[in-house]
């Protein structure tokens, strides 16, 4: 649930969606078929923005055609057609086949904490 409780992010089958609860419609959708997959996501605690951990080909716009794991920021505005997607960070390729879980953000320090589980190991 978003900061103002107007938006809900969720997975449905192979899609990852943002739903506007007031307008009763999907305002953003990504198809996870093919080269991209959402590994995890977390709403920020102090604004209508969502951090999305995504893996696949072309995840980082600065390196199209290369396989990356990245964190994207999806900023949701009052305009239902306006979801701003920006690549915030590219993670090491060792996270490519991992599962991202337990995502937390400290608003006081702006530090992001998340657990990575994969290849018979866990990291924070």
Image (cartoon, grey):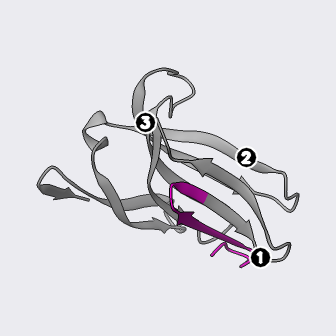
Residue 50 placement: quadrant: bottom right
Q: Residues within 10 Å of mark 3 (few under 14, many from 20)?
A: many
The disc placed on residue 56 is 3
Mark 2 vs mark 3: give the one in front: 3
At horizontal 82% and vertical 51% (from top left) the residue drawn is 82
Residues tagged 3 and 1 counted as in contact (Cβ below 8 A): no
At horizontal 57% and vertical 39% (from top left) the residue drawn is 87
Taking 55 as reference, is 81 left or right? right
Q: Please give the residue where the numbered disc 2 appears in the rendered image.
A: 84
Looking at the image, residue 31 lies above or below residue 64: below
Residue 48 seen in render: no
Looking at the image, residue 46 lies above or below residue 28: below
What segment carries the magenta color? 1-16
Element type at mark 2:
strand
Taking 62 as reference, is 53 left or right? left
Q: Please give the residue where the numbered disc 1 appears in the rendered image.
A: 21
Kindly report the distance in space between the C-alpha atoms of the residues bearing marks 3 and 1: 30 Å
Which of disc 1 and disc 2 is earlier in sequence? 1
Element type at mark 1:
loop
Whether residue 10 appears in magenta in the rendering, the answer is yes
């Amino acid at each position: 649930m978003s900061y103002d409780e107007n938006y809900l992010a969720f997975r449905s089958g192979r899609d990852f969606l943002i739903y506007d609860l007031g307008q009763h419609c999907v305002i953003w959708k990504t198809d996870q078929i093919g080269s991209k997959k959402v590994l995890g996501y977390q709403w920020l605690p102090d604004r209508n923005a969502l951090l999305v951990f995504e893996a696949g080909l072309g995840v980082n716009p600065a390196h199209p055609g290369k396989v990356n794991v990245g964190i994207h920021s999806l900023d949701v505005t009052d305009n239902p057609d306006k979801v701003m997607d920006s690549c915030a960070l590219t993670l090491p390729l060792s996270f490519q086949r991992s599962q991202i879980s337990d995502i937390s953000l400290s608003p006081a320090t702006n530090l992001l904490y998340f657990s990575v589980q994969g290849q018979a190991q866990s990291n924070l």
